[in-house]
Image (cartoon, helix red, strand yellow):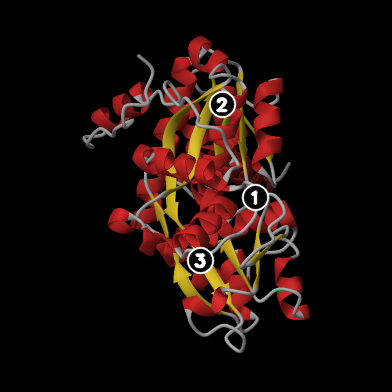
């Protein structure tokens, strides 16, 4: 073999040998696409926790952006090390609760109403709320040609996502506070409440079959892109303009058997929220990339730019607001007076927060004894 050929071959082999090292260096630089690509490698080589895998559920919604970004950027997997992250997505709270009850998922991001319903129906035996994730991101958006003031909502057709869901309860409570009467089950009364899947609400608005909607993001901003106007941001109705929209729940069995895994997921959630706050534009793009992967298409710039600022990504589950939301459901006749004692176990989260130098959060007297 000629000398020049041997030299070229040696250089090629040396470059090939150096490539894995270079990839490892790039992956160690922080979160991002490279970290995401290396999740399987991290799971294979990292220290395994007490479970081989953890099954995480969440919605492909911006109010679940902590889960979207934490998954997309590999932050959860980095905290889990050799314990593999397995993800399932849901479009409604009841189906996620069913999956948790069936053992199909271990931990989930979910709204307050399904968490309350799941806990009370199981007589307090199926789940615990172990953390918060998001506040806000819910708006009353209306056709400005038909509704110009809040009082104009009377007599109109307003969509909510589902009978008894978090936004449905909030809207019924707002209607009641206005002194108007609506039958919660049928949605008939001084306002017509039309339970409409968020996927088809924009089409219902365009067709004129609804006059507005009380909905979470990004549905609210999708309607705005079709000409609707924001008449009310729900955060304006709450003390401090904060109310829980997304919680983190866990199977009580999984929490008892694998507390180290639950702590790792909570560390991932806390670190994801930190990263979102420090890199808002990058985090917004990351969430949209994950949404594209899950749904086949990303949100348009106008929609996501309008939705993103209205959501606060926080670790505090805002327990007092969950208790208030339960009271609203009782007042509407959708829920019997619930016993929520023990619905929270915030000890793992407070341990994570303390280690990170952050203040502990309260369970509002609803924690496990």
Q: Alpha-carbon neighbours of circle 3 within 10 Å: few (<14), some, or many (≥20)?
A: many
Residue 70 visible in the picture = no
**What separation in Å lies between label 3 and label 2 (alpha carbons)?**
28 Å
Q: Residue at x 42, y 24 (%)?
A: 263
Q: Earlier in the sequence, mark 3 or mark 1?
A: 1
Residue that mark 2 sits on: 120
Q: Residue at x 47, y 57 (%)?
A: 283
Instruction: Provide the secondary structure element on which disc 1 rests.
Output: helix
Q: Earlier in the sequence, mark 3 or mark 2?
A: 2
**What separation in Å lies between label 3 and label 1 (alpha carbons)?**
70 Å
Mark 2, mark 1: which one is toward the viewer?
2
Does the CB distance between marks 3 and 2 fall below 8 Å?
no
Residue that mark 1 sits on: 4
Instruction: Provide the secondary structure element on which disc 3 rests.
Output: strand
Q: In the figure, 65 relative to 335: above or below?
A: below
Instruction: Provide the secondary structure element on which disc 2 rests.
Output: helix
Q: In x, y percent, where is residue 243?
A: 40, 50
Q: Alpha-carbon neighbours of circle 1 within 10 Å: few (<14), some, or many (≥20)?
A: few
Viewer-side residue, 167 vs 86: 167
Q: In x, y percent, where is residue 237?
A: 38, 60
Q: In x, y percent, where is residue 29?
A: 41, 46
Q: How many marks?
A: 3
Does the CB distance between marks 2 and 1 fall below 8 Å?
no
Does the CB distance between marks 3 and 1 fall below 8 Å?
no
Q: Residue at x 61, y 17 (%)?
A: 52
Q: In x, y percent, where is residue 63?
A: 52, 53
Residue that mark 3 sits on: 139
Q: Alpha-carbon neighbours of circle 2 within 10 Å: few (<14), some, or many (≥20)?
A: many
């Amino acid at each position: 073999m000629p000398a020049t050929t041997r030299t070229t071959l040696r250089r090629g082999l040396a470059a090939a040998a150096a490539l894995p090292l270079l990839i490892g260096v790039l992956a160690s630089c922080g979160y991002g696409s490279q970290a995401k690509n290396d999740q399987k490698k991290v799971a294979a080589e990292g220290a395994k926790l007490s479970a081989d895998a953890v099954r995480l559920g969440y919605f492909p919604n911006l109010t679940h952006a902590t889960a979207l970004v934490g998954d997309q950027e590999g932050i959860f997997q980095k905290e889990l090390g050799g314990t593999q992250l397995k993800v399932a997505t849901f479009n409604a709270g009841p189906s996620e609760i069913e999956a948790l009850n069936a053992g199909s998922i271990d931990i989930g991001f979910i709204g307050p109403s399904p968490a309350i319903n799941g806990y009370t129906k199981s007589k307090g035996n199926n789940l615990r709320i172990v953390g918060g994730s998001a506040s806000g991101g819910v708006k009353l958006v209306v056709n400005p040609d038909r509704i110009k003031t809040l009082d104009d909502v009377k007599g109109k057709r307003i969509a909510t996502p589902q009978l008894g869901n978090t936004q449905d309860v909030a809207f019924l409570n707002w209607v009641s506070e206005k002194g108007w009467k609506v039958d919660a089950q049928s949605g008939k009364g001084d306002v017509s409440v039309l339970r409409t899947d968020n996927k088809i609400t924009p089409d219902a608005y365009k067709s004129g079959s609804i006059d507005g909607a009380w909905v979470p993001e990004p549905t609210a901003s999708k309607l705005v892109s079709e000409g609707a106007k924001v008449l009310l941001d729900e955060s304006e109705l709450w003390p401090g303009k904060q109310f829980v929209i997304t919680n983190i729940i866990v199977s009580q069995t999984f929490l008892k058997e694998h507390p180290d895994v639950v702590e790792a997921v909570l560390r991932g959630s806390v670190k994801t929220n930190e990263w979102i706050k420090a890199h808002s534009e990058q985090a917004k793009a990351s969430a949209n990339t994950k949404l594209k992967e899950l749904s086949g298409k990303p949100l348009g710039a106008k929609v996501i730019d309008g939705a993103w600022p209205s959501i606060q990504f926080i670790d505090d589950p805002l327990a007092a607001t969950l208790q208030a939301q339960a009271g609203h459901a009782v007042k509407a006749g959708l829920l019997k007076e619930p016993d929520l004692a023990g619905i929270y176990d915030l000890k793992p989260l407070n341990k994570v927060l303390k280690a990170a130098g952050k203040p502990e959060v309260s369970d509002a007297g609803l924690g496990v004894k």
